Amino acid sequence: MRNANPAFRAARSRSRNDRSRCRNRRSRSRNGRSPLSEIRISDATYYNWKAKFGGMTVSDAQRLKALEAENARLKRLLAESMLDNAALKDVLGRKW
């Protein structure tokens, strides 16, 4: 029998109830619209942000943003150097 452990079933039931309570609490605001639609954020965006920044403090998020900016800058530098390298190989590979 699959998942016959009573503790597992109880924990699974609790997690389902917690999710539905959270979903119901978040689902409607005073005027009947979802809070996310009021601030024009899609559910997908909300859950992506929650997955990315869920357990972070403000300082962690700022550090992550700085590291992502530095990573993007380094990727651009690498792409430029690879382009220069390919151009030099092309020029040196020709027979004059």
Image (cartoon, grey):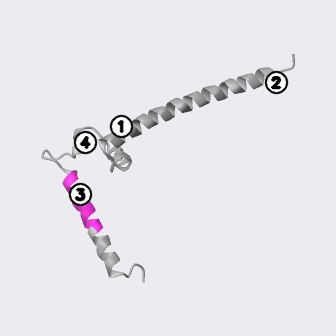
Of the pair 89 and 35, the residue shown nearer to us: 89
Q: Which residue is located at x 13 percent, y 44 percent?
A: 31
Q: Which residue is located at x 54 percent, y 31 percent?
A: 74
Which of the two marks, 4 or 2, is nearer to us in this view? 2
Q: Give the range drawn in magenta.
A: 15-26
The residue type indicated by label 4 comes to Ser
- Residue 6: give x, y in percent of width and height: 32, 81
Q: Looking at the image, is mark 3 or mark 4 earlier in the sequence? A: 3
Q: Do the residues labelled 1 and 4 touch (CB within 8 Å)?
A: no
Residue 20 counted in the magenta span: yes
Task: Check disc 3 and report the residue beneath it.
Answer: 22
> Residues under labels 3 and 1: Cα distance?
28 Å
| Residue 93's disc number | 2
Q: Looking at the image, is mark 2 or mark 3 earlier in the sequence? A: 3
Task: Determine the secondary structure under disc 4.
Answer: helix
Q: Do the residues labelled 3 and 1 touch (CB within 8 Å)?
A: no
- Residue 84: give x, y in percent of width and height: 67, 23
Task: Check disc 4 and report the residue beneath it.
Answer: 37
> Residues under labels 2 and 3: Cα distance?
64 Å
The residue type indicated by label 1 comes to Gln
Q: Which residue is located at x 50 percent, y 32 percent?
A: 72
| Residue 62's disc number | 1
